[in-house]
Structures are given as C-alpha cells and as structure tokens.
C-alpha cells in the first residue's frame, strides 16, 4: 500500500525511562495519545543517568500495555541518555564502542522482557558514519537524526522538513516559548504548508506542563483538518511508504 496522496505524521514519545519522577508524566502522555487513537513510537532509555535501569518491576509492568505486539512501536534511545549533565553522544564513538553501548542497552531491555527494538534514536539526534555502520551490522532497520530518517538495511535516507519539538532546553519552564513556536508551525500547516513527513517529538519529563493539551489538539487537527495519517517506524519498514 502506498501513500503518495497522503501526508505522514510520526509521533515519538522520547525519554521514556524507569526514573519514577518522570514516569507518571510519561504514562499520562501515553494514555492521552491512546485516547486520540493514533499510532506513536516509544523511545526507551535502558539505564537513565546510569542510575535507573529498566526492570520488570520498575518499568515493564507500567508500560507493557502501551507496547504494540503485532507492529512494534519501540525505539532504543541510547543507553543512559545523559550523565553528569552531558548528553550521550553517538557522533564521536567508534563502531566498536557504539556496538558495545547498544548491546548493553538491548541486554537491559531483554532482561525486562521488552522486545528488542529495531529503531534507534540517539539522545543528541546526531549519528556518525561509525554509528550508522554499527546499527547496520546489528540489524537495526531505522535510525532517526535531526533532519532525516534512515532506512538502514535498504540504504535509504529520507530528509524530513519539519520537526515539532517542545523540549528546547531540557527545562520545562525554559521550554515555555516552544508553546508559541509550535502553534505557529501548526497554523502554517493548516494554512497550506504541508511537509510530506512531519515529525512530532514529545518529551513528557521536560515539556511545559500546558504542552500536552496543545499537543493533543495539534495531533487531532493534523489528522482531521490537514489530512495527516500517523505511522510508527515499523510501518516504514513493513509498508511501501511513498514508494520506499
């Protein structure tokens, strides 16, 4: 099935971890997205801050019902995301180092009975040729960086024109200007600017408190008024999206 006449929306809930201070906001976002009946991806951090590893008791029992079984919607979001105020970097690692880091993350998810993801989203949204090689060798299907989506095993890069993102600083108060910025993007889309692929990045631990209502309104408006259909990254692999 192809979607040449459609616009594709990709929603990803980032920074999903076992850190309890963040988990409640994350689950609330998942519940609200589920109520909107749209598909979305979940980007999981296996060992946030090198202190909060994902386990069955601290994590899986809370989010298992949000993980799709027939069409997986999970992505590996690095290993620890950040440590000592430094964001985990997959742009300077060697291929060997990248493989080691990714293997550690996959092992943690496996121990927590979470299916092995085939999608990789680096915390800093940058991927080096070394990381790309490691992902290919380890059988990953998709990677997402700042301005493109790579279908790794097919050697296809899809440039994305627009990302809606409410986390511009890592602090919910300092992120409040993103409310206006994303409203302006949405208004332009409704007025006629319709990127072929629109990515929506949600960061429940860091988005402004009032962002969730706006995000849901935007998602519903994109679907009902702008004609977007929402897909997971697994759909990009399994379906003939735009002839890819």
Image (tube, rainbow, N blue to C red):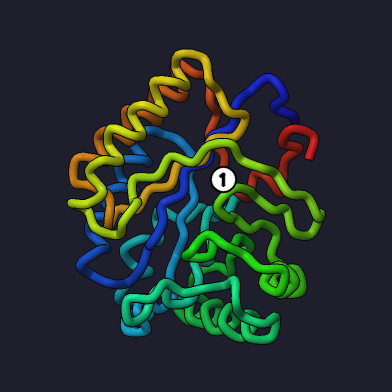
Can you see residue 166?
yes
| Residue 55 percent location from the top left of the image | 38, 78
For mark 1, give the secondary structure: loop
Mark 1 Cα-neighbour bin, 10 Å: few <14, some 14–19, many ≥20: many
| Residue 182 percent location from the top left of the image | 36, 34
Task: Say which quadrant the N terminus sits in.
Answer: top right
Q: Using the rendered view, name the quadrant where residue 99 is placed.
A: bottom right
Task: Say which quadrant the C terminus sits in.
Answer: top right
In the figure, is residue 186 to the left or right of 178? Answer: right
- Residue drawn at 40 percent across, 79 percent down: 47
Between 127 and 205, the residue placed more toward the observer is 127
In the figure, is residue 237 to the left or right of 211? Answer: right
How many marks the image carries: the answer is 1
> Disc 1 marks which residue?
232
- Residue drawn at 30 percent across, 59 percent down: 170
Q: Using the rendered view, name the quadrant where residue 6 is placed.
A: top right
| Residue 94 percent location from the top left of the image | 67, 82
- Residue drawn at 45 percent across, 24 percent down: 222
| Residue 82 percent location from the top left of the image | 39, 74
Between 195 and 78, the residue placed more toward the observer is 195
In the figure, is residue 17 to the left or right of 2? Answer: left
Can you see residue 55?
no
- Residue drawn at 44 percent across, 17 percent down: 190
Question: Is residue 181 placed above or below 224 in the rendered structure?
Answer: below
Between 133 and 56, the residue placed more toward the observer is 133
């Amino acid at each position: 099935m192809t979607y040449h006449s459609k616009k594709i929306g990709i929603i990803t809930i980032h920074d999903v971890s076992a850190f309890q201070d963040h988990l409640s906001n994350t689950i609330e976002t998942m519940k609200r997205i589920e109520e909107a009946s749209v598909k979305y991806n979940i980007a999981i951090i296996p060992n946030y801050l090198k202190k909060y590893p994902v386990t069955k008791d601290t994590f899986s029992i809370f989010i298992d019902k949000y993980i799709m079984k027939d069409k997986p919607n999970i992505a590996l979001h690095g290993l620890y995301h950040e440590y000592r105020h430094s964001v985990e970097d997959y742009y300077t690692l060697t291929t060997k180092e990248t493989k080691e880091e990714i293997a550690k993350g996959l092992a943690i998810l496996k121990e927590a009975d979470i299916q092995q993801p085939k999608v990789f989203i680096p915390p800093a949204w940058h991927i080096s040729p070394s990381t790309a090689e490691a992902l290919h060798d380890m059988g990953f299907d998709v990677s997402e960086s700042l301005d493109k989506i790579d279908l790794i095993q097919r050697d296809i890069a899809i440039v994305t024109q627009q990302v809606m993102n409410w986390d511009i600083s890592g602090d919910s108060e300092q992120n409040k200007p993103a409310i206006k910025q994303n409203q302006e993007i949405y208004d332009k889309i409704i007025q006629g600017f319709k990127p072929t692929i629109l990515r929506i990045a949600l960061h429940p631990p860091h988005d402004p408190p009032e962002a969730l209502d706006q995000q849901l309104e935007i998602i519903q408006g994109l679907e009902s008024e702008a004609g977007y259909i929402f897909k997971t990254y697994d759909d990009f692999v399994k379906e003939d999206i735009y002839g890819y």
